Image (cartoon, rainbow, N blue to C red):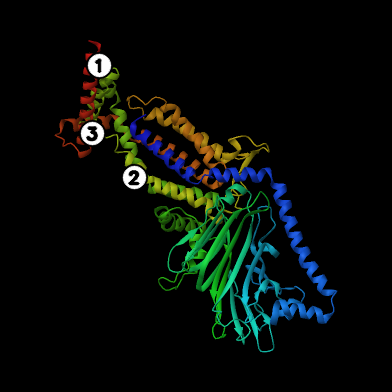
């Protein structure tokens, strides 16, 4: 195998290994996961016990108040909650707002959003796709009264007031006839955005005059919605956007807490394909963000935010918030910035992970437009991926052709290279042999490096696709051949036993598309090694390394989206077809004759060749000095 191909495959392996290494669980996380696995029942029991104790305390408190005379009960509530004492009593009810896309329920206790369901989607096991329900999500505001009492809205009962619009609702916290706090909700038709505003009326003398912000605490447990828990967990994270800056996120693979001093535009609790985003018109201030891994259960992570929003105690202006409760679909999220002023964009599309800056640009302006265009004409996503692969290979064809021509030049010169090897045998003549070989390539117009650059230029597209397929929600629950969901693995063999190393990296299954991709890559490796044999001596163990690389792909892709393995399977088959076509169409006798003609022409050495020869000369001088020293020692 020539150096060009070796370098190319090594670079591919290095890039994939580095990507996998950077995204691997940390030792701390692995240790934490092991501890979690060993103590799941204890943790879950402790959590349930704590929740039961809290519920029992609340019930006990209410029962103790119920057994007291009304005068004593009112006195205790008045002493604890002041002017808000009357709002402590009530019956929790929910009011539903819905359109064709979204159903939400707002609870009278706390006036908070306590349920969200996406109507057009279901979970991997065909259940309704509910983002959260009940206490899985909590949004509480802290009110500081004029008498310095600290009240949480989670404990208070609001009164629902329906407007003329059936999808508008005001939850009113009545303090007195002329003093109240309104939480207003509005859901537009065919939209995933839920408008949410907070406005006070007559709260002077009720709340502390120093109040100009409302502290809020927002928590949510993220449900598992997809088949592959581990893979979904790797794409679940807390994202946040600075008011006039970029989007950041907390770690997906470990517990993390972050204090942010700068104002934030929005905070998102995102899983692989769906997100709950809280957007502030004026920004969140002094924010603490927290992400915790969940033990193996029906939830992936627990996200928590403690922050504050501006609040006008005079009631002249409302505090405007917005919920986004919907899919992480690039085109949909991008559309929310249509018509926005420069610097005022939401940038919600950055919730869709598509790699770093260069890879994101390739996905944004090349892969996604082609994918969406094909989706307008074809309903089979297997066919769409096949056509996308053809287009990508067509775009890369000039680079592929140039790389093949470089290998072909090296191959037709093989007899001459073998003659040089016979002329300069042995390790002690390695420098002379290498120098003569490079001179041959230079005179003939062939270069071991000329095919390496085309391969390097293909890497950004390959890595962009590596990021695109797992995050493409259009592939979710779309079947093709034996795969019932192209967005996750297509397991044909499963087992329950935890096998050391194997289960950690391969999972407890084997995916058929991944197996086929690996097998085809092994065949291609053997085929390519035979076709690109240039007669040069290979590094020890290189042949074995070339066969190990496809096996590495098996570990990289077995738990990934089957669409990704399918793409690389088709891509490799096309590459084999291209190589066979090149071999059939290109007359290697004419190519050799052309190279022989090049030898007769005066040829100016390139700067690379001059530097290479200079390095070889210096290395030869070092070897000669070492030989002389060894001969002196022998004497």
Badge 1: residue crowd in 10 Å (few <14, some 14–19, many ≥20): few
Alpha carbon distance from label 3 to label 2:
28 Å
Report which residue position mark 2 lands on.
Answer: 398
Q: Is residue 327 above or below residue 424?
A: below
**Disc with the residue nearer the chain's start (3 vs 1):** 3
Quarter occupied by residue 545? top left
Q: Tell me how many marks there are.
A: 3
Give the quarter of the image for residue 58: bottom right
Say if 230 sits above or below 523 in the image: below
Residue 612 shows which numbered tag? 3
- The span from disc 3 to disc 1 (Cα, nearest Å) is 27 Å
Number of residues whose C-alpha sits closer than 10 Å to that of mark 2, classed few (under 14), some (14–19) or many (20 or more): few
Image x and y of residue 179, in percent: 65, 86
Numbered circle sitting on residue 182? none
Up-down: is 325 above or below 281? Answer: above
Mark nearest the camera among 1 and 2 is 1
For this rendering, which residue is in front, 274 or 441?
Answer: 274
Between residue 18 and residue 511, name the one nearer to us. 18
Q: Is residue 235 left or right of residue 175?
A: left
Q: Quadrant of the C terminus?
A: top left
Q: Which residue is mark 1?
A: 630
Of residues 374 and 225, the one drawn nearer to the viewer in this rendering: 225
Secondary structure of the residue carrying tag 1 is helix
Point out the residue furthest to the left here. Answer: 602
Residue depicted at 68% across the width and 84% down the height: 175
């Amino acid at each position: 195998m020539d150096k060009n191909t070796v370098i190319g495959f090594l670079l591919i392996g290095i890039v994939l290994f580095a990507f996998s290494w950077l995204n691997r669980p940390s030792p701390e996380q692995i240790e934490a996961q092991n501890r979690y696995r060993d103590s799941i029942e204890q943790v879950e029991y402790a959590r349930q016990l704590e929740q039961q104790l809290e519920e029992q305390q609340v019930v006990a408190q209410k029962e103790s108040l119920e057994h007291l005379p009304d005068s004593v009960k009112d006195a205790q509530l008045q002493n604890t909650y002041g002017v808000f004492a009357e709002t402590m009593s009530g019956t929790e009810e929910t009011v539903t707002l819905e359109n064709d896309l979204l159903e939400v329920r707002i609870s009278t206790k706390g006036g908070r959003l306590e349920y969200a369901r996406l109507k057009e989607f279901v979970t991997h096991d065909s259940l309704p796709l509910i983002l959260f329900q009940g206490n899985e999500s909590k949004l509480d505001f802290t009110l500081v009264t004029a008498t310095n009492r600290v009240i949480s809205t989670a404990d208070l009962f609001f009164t629902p007031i329906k407007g003329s619009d059936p999808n508008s609702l005001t939850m009113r916290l009545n303090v007195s006839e002329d003093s109240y706090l309104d939480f207003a909700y509005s859901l537009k038709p065919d939209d995933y955005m839920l408008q949410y505003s907070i406005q006070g009326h007559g709260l002077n003398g009720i709340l502390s005059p120093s109040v100009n912000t409302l502290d809020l605490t927002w928590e949510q447990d993220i449900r598992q919605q997809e088949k592959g828990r581990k893979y979904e967990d790797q794409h679940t994270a807390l994202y946040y956007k600075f008011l006039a800056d970029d989007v950041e996120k907390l770690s997906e693979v470990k517990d993390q807490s972050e204090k942010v001093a700068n104002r934030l535009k929005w905070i998102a609790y995102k899983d692989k394909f769906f997100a709950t985003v809280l957007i502030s018109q004026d920004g969140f201030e002094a924010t603490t963000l927290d992400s915790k891994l969940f033990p193996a259960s029906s939830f992936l992570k627990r996200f928590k935010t403690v922050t504050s929003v501006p609040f006008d105690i005079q009631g002249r202006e409302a505090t405007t918030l917005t919920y986004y409760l919907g899919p992480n679909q690039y085109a949909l999220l991008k559309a929310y910035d249509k018509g926005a002023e420069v610097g005022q964009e939401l940038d919600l599309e950055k919730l869709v992970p598509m790699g770093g800056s260069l890879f994101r640009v390739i996905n944004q302006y090349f892969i996604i437009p082609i994918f969406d265009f094909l989706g307008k004409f074809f309903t089979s996503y297997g066919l769409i991926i096949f056509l996308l692969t053809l287009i990508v290979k067509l775009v890369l064809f000039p680079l592929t052709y140039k790389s093949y021509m470089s290998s072909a030049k090296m191959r037709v010169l093989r007899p001459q290279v073998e003659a040089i090897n016979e002329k300069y045998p042995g390790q002690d003549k390695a420098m002379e042999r290498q120098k003569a070989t490079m001179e041959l390539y230079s005179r003939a117009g062939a270069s071991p490096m000329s095919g390496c650059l085309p391969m390097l230029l293909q890497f950004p597209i390959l890595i962009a696709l590596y990021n695109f397929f797992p995050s493409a929600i259009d592939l979710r629950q779309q079947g093709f051949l034996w795969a019932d969901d192209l967005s996750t693995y297509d397991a044909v063999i499963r087992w329950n036993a935890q096998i050391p190393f194997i289960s950690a990296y391969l999972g407890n299954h084997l995916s058929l598309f991944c197996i086929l991709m690996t097998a085809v890559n092994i065949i291609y490796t053997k085929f390519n090694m035979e076709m690109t044999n240039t007669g040069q001596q290979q590094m020890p163990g290189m042949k074995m390394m070339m066969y190990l690389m496809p096996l590495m792909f098996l570990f990289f892709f077995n738990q990934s989206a089957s669409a990704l393995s399918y793409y690389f399977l088709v891509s490799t088959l096309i590459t084999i077809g291209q190589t066979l076509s090149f071999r059939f169409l290109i007359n290697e006798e004419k190519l050799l004759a052309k190279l022989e003609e090049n030898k007769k022409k005066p040829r100016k050495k390139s700067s690379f060749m001059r530097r290479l020869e200079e390095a070889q000369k210096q290395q030869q001088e070092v070897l000669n000095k070492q030989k002389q020293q060894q001969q002196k020692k022998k004497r």
